[in-house]
Amino acid sequence: MVSVIIPAHNEEKTIGQVIKSVRSHPSVEEILVVNDGSTDETVAIAKRAGATIVYSFPVNQGKAAAMHYGVNHAKNNLILFLDADIEGLTHETVTELIEAVSNGGFGMAVVLRGRGIYWSNKILRIFPAIGGERVLTKELWGRVPHNLIKGFQIEIALNYYAKSTGARMKLIFAPTLHQTIKERKYGLWNGLLRRARMIEEMCVIGIQLYFLDSLHIRAYNPAQEETDTRV
């Protein structure tokens, strides 16, 4: 069985439908909404839509903090994270995510959304798995250092530790799934600013983990470098 965790900050327009899209899935035992300091009707709508429980932060602490709180309060070892502003999630996609981890030998499965065409999609060439919809185990979550559980860095950190620890990661394409883009949600200029900050965070953590930390590990473990080359 799976615990669904949905971090949410002012998502009254979409949170209800997200909850309803997974509420009746046979593998979903509980739906935990972590309200990250919302000032709108997110909490009331989440409760009406059927969330098992809604936890609330008094002030906004960021997506990663909400995710971490949810993991610490989830019943099950298998976790399904969902963004609160998605549309078009199907039971078939949820099942594919869950089975990749529960039966397929993967430590994590991540959805690649059917995105519209806007300029920031180019970052997918660098970070191909930045979707908020993913299934993983609590053990994999626990491998991420606490100092990396912040902001938008968490998704890149999860990718890195899934690969570097041999947990393996599967990518699942969901053409019907899409997300409300920041420019539409917050207005053009505010949305662009938020997007720029997100990209900056992901680039910084990507360089740190995939380049600087890798160089450090190889410098002190040449035997591992030889093994990697043979593989």
Image (tube, rainbow, N blue to C red):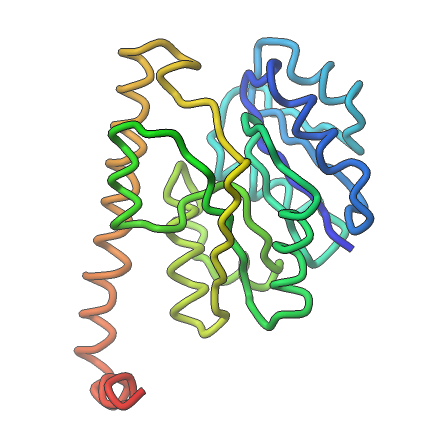
Q: Which quadrant would residue 18 be assigned to in this image?
A: top right
Residue 110 place in picture, x, y as percent: 50, 52
In which quadrant will I find the C terminus?
Answer: bottom left
The residue drawn where x is 24% and y is 68% is 214
Q: Which quadrant would residue 36 be assigned to in this image?
A: top right
Q: Is residue 38 left or right of residue 147?
A: right
Residue 64 place in picture, x, y as percent: 48, 39
The residue drawn where x is 55% and y is 36% is 176
Q: Is residue 98 left or right of residue 186?
A: right
Task: State whether residue 69 is above or below residue 1.
Answer: above
Task: State whether residue 109 is above or below residue 48.
Answer: below
* Residue nearest the viewer, comparing 110 with 89: 89
The residue drawn where x is 45% and y is 64% is 162
Q: Is residue 139 left or right of residue 123?
A: right
* Residue nearest the viewer, comparing 173 with 30: 173
Residue 181 place in picture, x, y as percent: 41, 23
